[in-house]
């Protein structure tokens, strides 16, 4: 019985690594399509005044900060990837929501890391203008990271709420 439970736990973790792998594959495939089919700076309208596919390269981080600091990004990304894998392995008793958020962040981190190692720059192409604001161009890996962080925040807020309810229930206090 113990061995069967171990296989179930390992199988569950494989599921989250598959999610990360799918995020990496989708990210790299879309970037490959952009590099192969569009000139740098070329733009395709998807929804006028809102969504464009724009071939762009970034040698920095979000919003182009820290341009050209590749070794910094290599070190930080490796540390982040190791930390995410560590927390994913230690999260046996955590919620699937927590593990899903880590899987998305892992996929996003690896996707942009591949670009930095192979191309010495990150391929960005999703260009939006929400409410007229020219949002910085991003990619699938960036989206995976942001969605993963958002889910992690939601998970943490839900856990905090559960803890407060548990503490209030144990102390006998009740709010109406």
Image: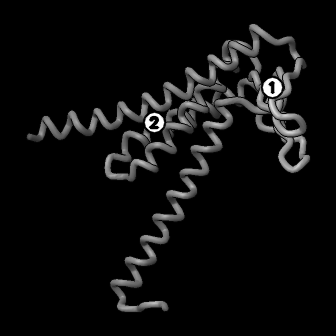
Quadrant of image for the N terminus? top left
The residue furthest top is 36
- Quadrant location of residue 43? top right
Q: Which residue is mark 1?
A: 53
Residue 51 locus on image (x, y percent)? 81, 35
Q: Residue at x 61, y 44 (%)?
A: 147
Q: Residue at x 42, y 78 (%)?
A: 165
Tag of residue 2? none
Q: Earlier in the sequence, mark 1 or mark 2?
A: 1
| Viewer-proximal residue among 30 and 150 | 30
Query: Which mark is nearer the camera, 1 or 2?
Result: 1
Q: Residue at x 32, y 37 (%)?
A: 12
Locate residue 149 relative to residue 15 in the image: left or right: right
Tag of residue 85? 2
| Viewer-proximal residue among 128 and 152 | 128
Residue 53 locus on image (x, y percent)? 80, 25
- Quadrant location of residue 16? top left
């Amino acid at each position: 019985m113990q061995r069967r439970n171990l296989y179930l736990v390992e199988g569950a973790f494989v599921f989250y690594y598959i999610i990360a792998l799918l995020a990496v594959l989708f990210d790299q495939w879309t970037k490959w399509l952009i590099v192969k089919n569009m000139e740098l700076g070329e733009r395709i309208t998807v929804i006028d005044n809102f969504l464009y596919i724009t071939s762009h390269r970034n040698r920095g981080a979000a919003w182009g900060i820290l341009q050209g600091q590749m070794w910094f990004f290599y070190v930080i990304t490796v540390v982040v990837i190791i930390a995410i894998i560590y927390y994913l392995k230690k999260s046996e008793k955590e919620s699937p929501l927590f593990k899903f958020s880590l899987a998305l962040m892992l996929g996003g981190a690896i996707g942009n890391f591949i670009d930095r190692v192979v191309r010495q720059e990150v391929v960005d192409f999703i260009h939006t203008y929400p409410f007229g604001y020219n949002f910085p161009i991003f990619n699938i890996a960036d989206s995976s990271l942001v969605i993963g962080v958002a889910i992690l925040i939601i998970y943490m807020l839900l856990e905090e709420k559960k803890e407060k309810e548990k503490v209030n229930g144990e102390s006998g206090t009740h709010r109406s």
